[in-house]
Amino acid sequence: MSDTASVSLALREKAERRRSRLLTLPAVLVITIFGILPLLVIVAFSFMSPGAYGGVEPPFTLEAYVSFLFSRDIFDDTLTFTPDYVLIYLRSLTFALGTTFVCLLLGFPTAYFMVTRPVESRKWWLLLVTIPFWSNLLIRTYAIMFIIRDEGLINNTLIGMGLINQPIVMLYTNFSIVLGLFYSFLPFMVLPLYSSLEKLDFRLVEAGYDLYATRSRVLWRIIVPMAKPGIVAGCLLVFIPTIGAYVTPLILGGGTHLMVGDLIAQQFGSSRNWPLGAAQAIILMAGVLVALFFYVRTTSEAKLHG
Amino acid sequence: MTVLESRQGLEIHHVGKVFSQPGRPDFRALDDVSIRIRPNEFFTLLGPSGCGKTTLLRMIAGFEHPSEGEIRLDGADISVKAPYERPVNTVFQSYALFPHLTVEDNISFGLEMLRRPKASIDETVTRMLALVRMTEMRNRKIQQISGGQQQRVALARALAPHPKLLLLDEPLSALDLKLRKEMQIELKRLQHETGITFIFVTHDQEEALTMSDRIAVMSAGRVQQIGSPRDIYDRPANRFAASFIGETNFVTVKLLTVSATSGELELPGGTVIHAGVPDGVKFSPGKATIVVRPEHAELVGAGAGNLAGTVTNIVYFGTDTHYHLRLKDESSFIVRRQNRHGLSFGPAIGDEVGVLIGEGVAQLVED
């Protein structure tokens, strides 16, 4: 009696499992077609040889990865270490970290301002923050260019007011790249910060004041730790796309500051070295993943203890 | 003399508070409130929600500033000082414990902000944990302890800096009945052991009566009466104070003569009795109201006593029974009788009964 009951129960469970597996199919398909397959293609390309007019050819080789770090002497085939690419990666890393930092520095007060507005007006502030998303990135980047170039809005205004004689050179500098990246990715910082600060219980802030904490100490000891999930998410959302950013550094850096995105594009374009481009993309991704791993681990540890 | 001067306690001097928001009419939360709270007192602000008690507490804490009047602590005006500049700590209704910190770090927070030396902080935290009986929970996270335990941590956190005033904003309202009773006794003990002035906000009249040295009854932004629990219960100043605290019978009477302490009056049935007069309230002969607590009136046989009525309902409470009566003038009256053994007289619904209001039981109140 109970045996047949348990058998039918087991059968039903089996059917249940089959159904739930069926329901996961669309997600699995999307991830495979748009995520895993292209990645496998890139990995495969990075282990092949460049074709004469672009594309890839056999044989399989590690040459792309070797040439990332070394240059091969065409006469005696010896390898010498060349840090050129590594330096470009480090430069991109610096720009990405700088942009993330600036976004956090300005995004935090912005998000804090938004959550301290009355509830009815918050949605308007959210709308204002997302307005840049409404126009094309390229157009926005060119707009910045027109504002900061030597004959741009800022310099013309300052010269017109007689404050300066010479235009201040802003375009095609480190400043213009960080400015452009900051402008493009600020909403990615503000929105997660907003959502985590919105959950902040302001009675905790009052409790902090009550316990003799001044404004700055309430900020550092209570608000920042409570907003940590938003800070982590915002930093990741800004850092990851900026380290591989292509359009913004290209236009606002004027090609004077080669960055990873630009470098990879070159391999698939004028250099016709697809394997190297693929290898560079893989190396970038691996680097980001390793950084991400450590970041998540330290923050989840913090969550466990703090 | 100087010692006395430095311990003047808290003076709330003609304080008013008006909240104004653009696009909305001004809201007056407090109107000309004057209270003097003595050092070491367990003082309760009692009133229904919206009476201004929490606003007053937030002003003492420094989260709001008075629109009028001033607040002085031991002689110094603290009206506009920031919360972190006042030797005052709060136990919040929601506890507001820091969820990212442990029990220990919550308790030491205030001491760290005051930059006390490390050794002294450790010593104080240990002492506070013992005081609220939470020693084993020292390293727990806030989410890992129960509501009652959070309550104790909130108390320890607020007591740790040894403030001059401890403000308690309905701290027991989230606890179940049994725990609440325990904490009431616990709070009295803590106040006694620390010697800190407690200012307790509640809407629970029973809580106020059992715990307080003195109570300020508040309603509609004003103080209705200040006095000891016994004063407030036995000699309510007005109709609000009488009805908010405990159950009360109001009887409309004819006041014949009145002095500063006593009045002679005629009950609806025509009998003449004497009633007490609350401090500082003036009455004139004519129509007046007296209050009689249900347990102060006595049920007697029809024709006896000084009021007559019919039993309309009988409610049994275990320890006592409430008899709802309709008096001759159609007003209702409740008599509470303790359920002792051997009570011979037990009227049923519909019976005619008499009510005896003894000497010194009735009290005149302002309408």
Image: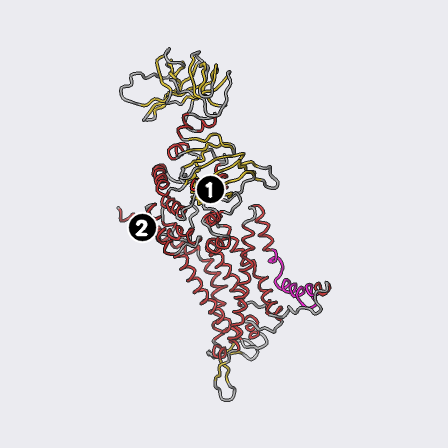
The vertical placement of B129 against B296, above or below, is: below
Quick one: label 2, few (<14), some, or many (20+) residues within 10 Å? few
Q: Position of residue B142 (x, y in %)?
A: 39, 50
Residue B30 drawn in magenta: no
Residue A142 drawn in magenta: yes
Element assignment for label 1: loop
Element assignment for label 2: helix
Amino acid at the residue labelled 2: Glu
For the N terminus of chain B, which image quadrant? Answer: top left
- In the rendered structure, find residue B74 and report the number of the disc placed on it: 1
Q: Position of residue B34 (x, y in %)?
A: 50, 34
Which quadrant would residue B209 be assigned to in this image? top left
Q: Position of residue B304 (x, y in %)?
A: 36, 12
Provide the chain ID for the residue under circle 2: B
Q: What residue is pinned by disc 2?
A: B136
Real-space CA distance between mark 2 and mark 1, rounded to the nearest whole angstrom: 37 Å
Residue at x 52% of width, y 46% of height: B81
Q: Position of residue B129 (x, y in %)?
A: 34, 48
- Residue A237 in view (yes/no): yes
The vertical placement of B235 against A85, above or below, is: above
Q: Which residues are magenta?
A: A131-155
Of discs 2 and 1, which sits in the foreground?
1
